[in-house]
Image (spheres, grey):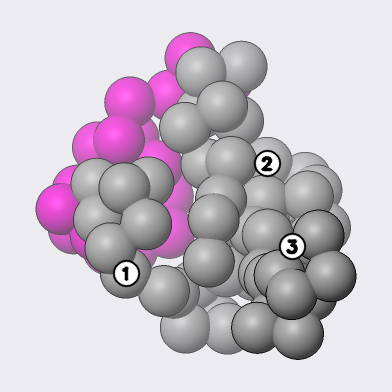
Amino acid sequence: MNNRIREFRARRNLTQEDLARKVGVRRETIVFLEKGKYNPSLRLAFDIARVFGVPIEDLFIFESDESRQFH
């Protein structure tokens, strides 16, 4: 799953540590999320989206195997 967390963080001048504190996780979690090495729980995804005031779909891009076959 791809995401746009880094982009949204930059728009708000938030560090990874700032975002981590706001959603109650460690900075390393944000690092792994931004690198695509970790998929968040639904709760964490909602919490991050809430910080930025956007729908989850604006932050996280999920491509199923079927959609990749047709692109």
User: Circles 3 and 2: CB distance less than 8 Å?
Assistant: no
Real-space Cα separation, disc 3 to disc 1, in angstroms: 16 Å
Asked if residue 67 lies left or right of residue 43, the reply is right
**Residue highlighted by disc 1:** 38
Q: Is residue 31 magenta?
A: no
Let me know if residue 20 appears in the view: no
Q: Is residue 30 left or right of residue 61?
A: left
Q: Residues within 10 Å of mark 3 (few under 14, many from 20)?
A: some
**Disc 2 from disc 1: Cα separation:** 20 Å
What's the residue at 67%, 51% (across, down)? 59
The mark lying in front, picked from 3 and 2, is: 3
Q: Is residue 23 above or below residue 38?
A: above
How far apart are the alpha carbons under marks 3 and 2?
A: 10 Å
Element on which disc 3 rests: helix
Q: Which mark is residue 56?
A: 3
Residue 32 in view, yes or no: yes
Query: Where residue 52 is drawn, which disc sits there?
Result: 2
The magenta stretch is 12-30
Q: Secondary structure at mark 1?
A: loop
Determine crowd level at label 1: few under 14, some 14-19, many 20+ residues with C-alpha closer than 10 A. Answer: some
Q: Nearer the viewer, mark 2 or mark 1?
A: 1
> How far across and down, in percent of the image, does residue 2 sit?
54, 55
Q: In the rendering, at what x and y percent does residue 60 appear?
A: 64, 59
Name the disc covering residue 27, or none: none
Residue at figure coordinates x 61%, y 17% from the top left: 11
Q: Residue at x 78, y 50 (%)?
A: 58
Looking at numbered disc 3 in the image, what kind of residue is underneath it?
Ile
Q: Look at the picture and state if 7 lies above or below 33.
A: above
